[in-house]
Image (spheres, rainbow, N blue to C red):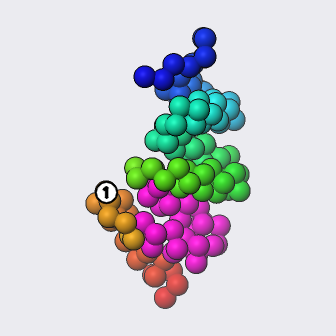
Amino acid sequence: MTVFGAGAPSPHELGERAQAAINQGHVEEAIGWWRQAVEQAASANDTEGMGYALLNIAMASTQLGDFEAAEEAFLEAVGTGHPAIVPRALISLAIVYKGTGRVPDARQCYERVLEVPGDPDLLSQARQGLAALDRTEG
């Protein structure tokens, strides 16, 4: 069990604070809580916790229209290497890329998801994403 500094909230507690901020419409505040959760999870070598916090940062950044920050957070989430995180981050990143006109990059993300066996739902999403790209390019 990882013990955090005296009085320091755990990544889970920080995530709860972030969710409460989101529920109140305070997206930037939520991003701050999730950034702290990333730091806490990283210090505990918790790649899954770090990855989920990064996914939340990325999604919140897209909500703010900050696609550059979203891309950065999604790529950091991919960098965790966690098998539950990587395909989710790649699919979400593909959606951002498609929405910002970066279709070849979107295609590459979907294809990377399909390269590794994993969650059938995520594989299905990647195949559907590629099919949608094929329809828009065709």
Q: Identify the residue under disc 1.
A: 119
- Residue 94 on image: x %, y %: 53, 65
Q: Give the range drawn in magenta.
A: 86-113
Q: Could you tell me which secondary element the residue under label 1 belongs to? A: loop
Q: Choose between 65 and 70: the one closer to the eye.
A: 70
Q: Residue 92 in magenta?
A: yes
- Residue 104 on image: x %, y %: 58, 78
Query: Could you tell me if residue 16 is visible in this image?
Result: no
Is 78 situated above or below 106? above
Please identify the quadrant where the N terminus is shown.
Answer: top left
Q: Choose between 125 and 112: the one closer to the eye.
A: 112
- Residue 64 on image: x %, y %: 68, 46
- Residue 48 on image: x %, y %: 46, 41
Main secondary structure type of the part rendered in magenta: helix
Residue most extreme to the bottom: 138
Q: Which residue is drawn at 52% across and 74% down?
A: 108
Q: Which residue is drawn at 53% across and 28% down?
A: 11
Tell me the amino acid under the disc marked 1. Answer: Asp
Query: Could you tell me if residue 11 is visible in this image?
Result: yes
Q: Which residue is drawn at 62% across and 34% down?
A: 39
